[in-house]
Image: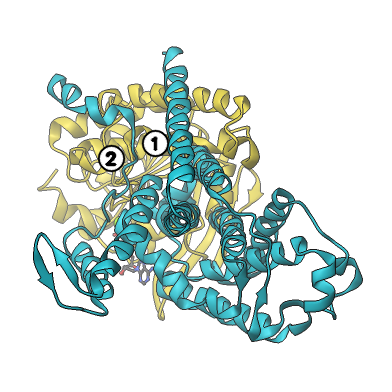
Chain colours: A yellow, B cyan
Amino acid sequence: MANVLIVKNLSIQFRGLAAVSGYALSLEKGAIFGLIGTNGAGKTTVFNMLTGALVPDSGTIAFEGKDITGHRPDRIAKRGIARTFQNLRLFSGISVLDNVLVGAQLYKHYGYFQGILGLPAARKDEAALREKALELLEIMGLADFASREAGSLPYGSQRRLEIARALATRPKLLLLDEPAAGMNPKESLELMETISRIRERFGVTVLLIEHDMKVVMNLCERVQVLCYGKIIAEGTPTEIKNDPQVVEAYLGRSVRHA
Amino acid sequence: MPRKPSATTLRGIGGVAVLAAALFVMNLTLPDYYLRIVNLIGINIILVASLNLTNGFTGIFSLGHAGFMAVGAYTSALLTIAPAQKALALPQLPLWLAGISLPFPAALVAAGLLASFAALLIGFPVLRLRGHYLAVATMGFLVIIRVVLTNAESFTRGARGISGLPVFTNSWWVFGIAVLTLYLLRKLVTSAYGRGMIAIRENTVAAEALGIPIARYRLIAFCTGAFFAGVGGALLGHLMSVISPNFFSYSQTFLLVEISIIGGCGSLTGAVVGSLIMTLLPEILRNFEGGGELFGIALPPMYGLSQIILASLLIVIIIFRPQGIMGTKEFSWSMFGKKRELKKG
Ligand SMILES: Nc1ncnc2c1ncn2[C@@H]1O[C@H](COP(=O)(O)OP(=O)(O)O)[C@@H](O)[C@H]1O
Ligand SMILES: [Mg+2]
C-alpha cells in the first residue's frame, strides 16, 4: 500500500531546547495511527510542523510524494492535510454551521466580484456548500446545533465541531490532537465509533494524538511513542503495551487512569 | 424556502421606498443647515460601514481611513473641477489632467479605485503586522498622505487646499450610495470571503489551518474598505466644496473609529446606528452650549459641554458595552419574531 506521508529526520528547537529531534513517520493510506507520549513530549509540535504552523529546523515532510516542508499552513490545508487543536480553536463567535462553512470554502467556485455583487453564481455555490456542511454536521451529530453560536456548545460537542470543520476541507490526512480530552467515557466511546466511521466513509488517513489508552488501543493499528522529543517505540498497540521501555517511560504512570 | 428571499427583497424595496419618501420630504421642508447634517449622517454611514469591514469583521485595527478619504477627495476634485477653473487655481497641473472634466459618478468610481490602489500599496508591507503595530503603521500612512498632499503643490495647492469643488453632493447621491454600500458590504460579509475574514478575526491560526490565505483576505478587506472610504471622502469634498490636508487627519480618523466602536464595529447595522447617534447628538447638544431654557429651567452657557458628553458616552460604552450598541448583530426582520422562536426551542 502507498504511503500518504513520509517524514524523515524532523527536528526543531525552542531557544536551544530540542522539542522534537530525528522524528520519522511513514503513514499508510487509510491507516489510523496513534501518537502517544507524556505531556511536553513534543506531539503537538510534530502536528505544528506537519501543518506548516511551525517550520522545522531540519528534516523533510513528503505528502503524497511531494515535499511540503515549511510550506504555508493554508497551502498545506489545500493539499489535503487538516487538523484539530488540543486547546480548541473554534470560531466561537459565529454559528456552528458557519464554522464548518469556513472549512468548506476551499471548494467555492465564485470570485470576489460575484460575491460582493451577490450574483446567482455565488448564491448557487453557497447553497451547495451549505448542503455539504449540514451533511457533515449530521454525521458528527451536531445537526441540531447548526444555528447555535459555536462557543455556546458543550465541551464535547465543541471537540466534535472541530473535527467536522476539519473534515469540511475534504482532507486526505486528518490530524486529531487529543480529540477525547475532557470527554466522559461514554462520549469518548462514541467518538471512537465516529472516527472509525469517518475513515470508512471518507477514506481518510488518521494520525491521532491521544492520552486515553483505551481509545488508542481500540482504534489504532499502529502506535508511536514519543518521549522528550524522540521516538522510543513504534508498533502495534499490543507490542507497545508490552515494551518495557514504554512501560517505564509512559504507561507505568498513566495505566492507572486508563 | 424559495419564497423567503423574495420576501426579504420586497422588504428591502419597501425600506428603500420609505427612505426615498423621507428624503423627498426633508428636501422640501428642511433648511440647508439641517439637510447638511442629514447628508453627513449618510456619508458617515458609508465611511464607518467600510471601516467596520477591516476593523470589525476582519480584525485589522486600521487608523488609516482618513488617508483613503483624502485620496478619494483629491482624486475626485482634480477630475471634476472645470478646466477653466483649474487653469487659474492649479496652473502647473499636467496637461492631461488640466483638460479633464469627468461626470460625478465617474469621478466617484475613480476616487474609490485610487484609494483602493493606495491600500494595495501600503497593505503589502503593513498587513503582516499584528494588533497595535498595525494600528501605528496605518497611522504612519496618514502622516505620509498628509506630507504628500502638503508638498505636491502643483496638484494640491499644498496646505492652502483646493476650493471650488463643484457641489454635486446631495442627499440623493449620499443615501443612494450609502444604501448601495451597505448592500454590497452585506453581500460580501455573508459570502465565503466575508466568512473567511470573520474567521481570521475569530482565530487566525485556525483560519489558516483550514486553508484561508490570511494575507490575501486581509488585503481584500483593506482594499474594499479603502474603496468606500475614497468614495465617502469624495462625497464629503463635493459637499463642503473645500478640501485641505488638515481636514483628513487624525481627528477625522478618530471620529470614525469612535462611531464604529459606539455602534458596534462587527456590524453594518452598528455603522448606521452609530452614525445616526454620533452625527445628531453633537448638533443637539451644541444648541444647549450657549445657554437657554429647557422645560422652563434657565441654563447657563456651557461651552465644550457637547464634547464632554460625547467623550463620557464613549467611556461609558467602552466600560459597560465594549462590543458597542450592536456588537456583531445585524438588523433583521426576524428580530421581532425571535421570542416565539425561543419558546419553541
Ligand atoms: N511555540 C513554542 N515555543 C516555545 N516552546 C514550545 C512551543 N511549542 C511547544 N513548546 C515546548 O515544546 C515542548 C513540547 O511541547 P508539545 O509539543 O506541546 O508537547 P505535547 O503536545 O507532547 O504535550 C514543551 O516543552 C513545550 O513547552
Ligand atoms: Mg499537546
* Chain letter for the residue marked with disc 1 in the picture: A
Viewer-nearest residue: A199 or B121: B121
Residue A82 visible from this viewpoint: no
Q: Horizontal placement of A96 versus B97: left or right?
A: left
Dot label at residue B221: none
Check whether the beta carbons of the residues at disc 1 and disc 2 lie within 8 A of each other: yes
Residue B117 visible from this viewpoint: yes
Q: Residue at x 36, y 32 (%)?
A: A97
Q: Is residue B228 above or below residue A130?
A: below
* Chain letter for the residue marked with disc 2 in the picture: A
Dot label at residue A98: 1
Residues indicated by labels 1 and 2 sit on the same polypeptide chain? yes
Q: Is residue A119 above or below residue A7?
A: above
Number of residue marks: 2
Badge 1 or badge 2: first in the primary sequence: 1
Q: Is residue A257 above or below residue B124?
A: above
Q: Is residue B339 above or below residue A220?
A: above
Q: Quadrant of ligand 2?
A: bottom left
